[in-house]
Image (tube, rainbow, N blue to C red):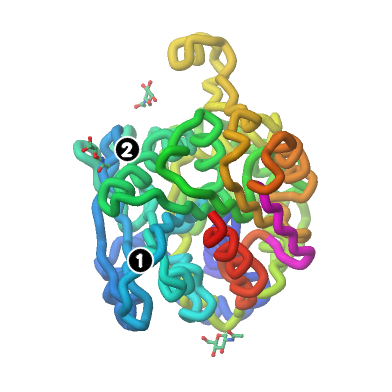
Amino acid sequence: MASTILVSLISIVLFCITVAQGRKTLHTTNEISASSLVTDDDICKSMVETQGYTCEEHKVTTEDGYILSLLRLSAGRSSEKANKPPVLIQHGLFCDAIIWLFNTPEESLGFILADSGFDVWLVNGRGTKYSTTHTSLSPTDTAYWNWSWDELANYDLPASVQYVYNHTGQKMHYVGHSQGTLMAFAALSQGNLVNMLRSTALLSPIAHMNLIPSKFTKLAADLFLADDAYWLGLREFLPNVDVGSKFLDGICKTLNLNCANLMSFFTGPNCCINASRIDIYLDHEPQPTSTKNLIHFSQMIRTGKIAKYDYVDQAQNVQHYGQRVPPTYDLTKIPNDFPLFLGYGGQDMLSDVQDVKVLLNDLQDHDANKLVAAFNQDYAHADFVMAVSAKQVVYDPMIAFFNAH
Ligand SMILES: *[C@@H]1O[C@H](CO)[C@@H](O)[C@H](O)[C@H]1NC(C)=O
Ligand SMILES: *[C@@H]1O[C@H](CO)[C@@H](O)[C@H](O)[C@H]1NC(C)=O
Ligand SMILES: *[C@@H]1O[C@H](CO)[C@@H](O)[C@H](O)[C@H]1NC(C)=O
């Protein structure tokens, strides 16, 4: 029991949130189980309208058949309709749209943008609680989980952007956290979406990953790659139950780490998360992802490359890509005049400062007045989404950037 709870905690931190300060309180919370992820509550009713905001749910079908739920906050608490452009917000791994609404309206990005006059759209990624339907498949089918972030970048993101563009008739700003930044990098490097976006904000950018300092994360990646056939067979990964929980617990023991501090081994020590809200976070997260996606991330951690999923078997790569090694996403191809805002932190162990330097090197020819790199020494991975100070530290400068573009 204790270990399951521990692991449910570990899971939410991978690319999403961390709760290092409040772990002790978890021993009093209920175990998170898969069944708690399939209740039928409604984010609009339970988390948005109760705070005085207008909320709509929209359904978007991707080219490969996944039906995504998008939430729209088209007015702030003053009830005045948005008078600024749409902003599309994309969460990271093991999260969903709720992550942008967890804190108070003064602290949560979804509410802050609505109160600032923007037309806010929050995506729930494929496979997460509110986006489990598909035109022909069910999550119990093997094929439903046959995707990695390649598909998130090449199907989910274009479908969401195109939908908002069609629906509002306006170009939008984009905000991604963690995996949500990788999706944007991949799309923009292929010249996609540029015509529908005004600018992009990338919080805890994930691009090159091989300088990650965490032994824990590196061992997890090695184990995923060593046993890829086994992991692929499992299809769906939920870190807080069964195999996922044993796996993470085992790494902790192998490295002889003090599991009480496990969260900070992954994300770095988040400075500014409100520990008394952890129980609420655990009611909603973590959300599942595919094992193929985790193998794809593990490949990035090993190689430092931003490339399509490697089937390892050369014949399979040829079959999928027409070449023996997977094609890379070349970030130097992102149009130099496309406005980019990067937020990164000195304590972040997933979006490590050394890896961000390599990313900034890729962007060295970017127009200087179209690239803002906002660094905060104290912030770790989850602070960008969850910190009580994020408005002052990250969101206000980001909104100023949006207003200028
Ligand atoms: C997974 O999808 C790829 C195409 O992306 C396809 O070639 C492969 O056969 C699929 N595998 C399964 C098990 O559905
Ligand atoms: C957007 O509009 C175009 C043109 O009407 C249509 O072909 C496309 O399917 C629409 N896409 C979405 C995601 O709404
Ligand atoms: C932290 O959360 C608790 C419980 O929701 C709340 O009472 C408190 O005001 C919060 N503190 C800050 C700094 O947001």
Spot the residue most to the left: 136
Identify the amino acid type marked 2. Tyr
Name above or below for residue 156 compared with residue 313.
Answer: below
Pinpoint residue 179: horizontal percent, then vertical percent: 54, 47
Q: Find residue 250 and report its horizontal and vertical position in percent.
A: 65, 51
- Residue indicated by mark 2: 144
Residue 394 can be seen, yes or no: yes
* Residue numbers of the magenta segment: 371-380
The three-letter amino acid code for the residue at tag 1 is Ser
Q: Going by the image, does 132 lie left or right of 135?
A: right
Residue under pointer 1: 36
Tell me the quadrant of ligand 2: top left
Residue in view at x 27 percent, y 46 percent: 166
Does 374 appear in magenta? yes
Task: Compare marks 2 and 1 and give the one earlier in the sequence.
Answer: 1
* Residue at the image position 56 percent from the left and 20 percent from the top: 327
Q: Secondary structure at mark 1?
A: helix
